[in-house]
Amino acid sequence: MLFRVSEILRARRFEFNAWLVLEVGKNWAEAEAETCEAIDFCELYARLALQLDRAEPVVQLPASAICCVTSLWERAR
């Protein structure tokens, strides 16, 4: 799906740039940079998802295991 999103963004790049200029107030160079970055991130995350899909799990957990993951920058102080 992310590959398809990047294809659509690439095909309609000028329209997307125009919306960024009109709605967000960016100049054309900034809008172009934002659009290119969005396309790159879509493709990056799609490729990473494919790699993770093929990866073997490091630790096998039982189906009933509960896991809690917290980000260091979001913990309470």
Image (cartoon, rainbow, N blue to C red):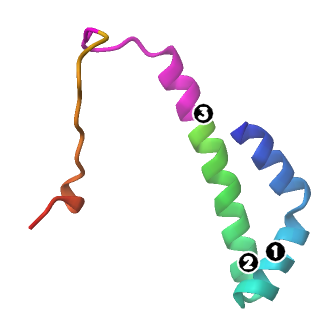
* N-terminal-most mark, 3 or 1: 1
Instruction: Name the kind of residue labelled 3 in the image.
Output: Arg
**Tag 1's secondary structure?**
helix
Q: Residue at x 60, y 51 (%)?
A: 41
State the mark number for residue 31.
2
Quadrant occupied by the C terminus: bottom left
Amino acid beneath label 2:
Ala
- Asked whether the residues under the numbered discs 3 and 1 touch, taking CB atoms below 8 Å apart as contact, a structural biologist would say no
Q: Are marks 2 and 1 in contact (CB under 8 Å)?
A: yes
Give the quadrant of residue 34. Answer: bottom right
Q: Is residue 54 left or right of residue 31?
A: left
Q: Position of residue 47 (x, y in %)?
A: 60, 33
Task: Specify the quadrant of the image occupied by residue 58.
Answer: top left
Q: Position of residue 24 (x, y in %)?
A: 70, 85
Asked whether 69 or 48 is in front, the reply is 69
Give me the residue at 51% from left, 15% from top.
54
Range of the magenta residues? 47-62
Report if residue 36 is visible in the image.
yes
- Residue 59 is left or right of residue 77, and the answer is right
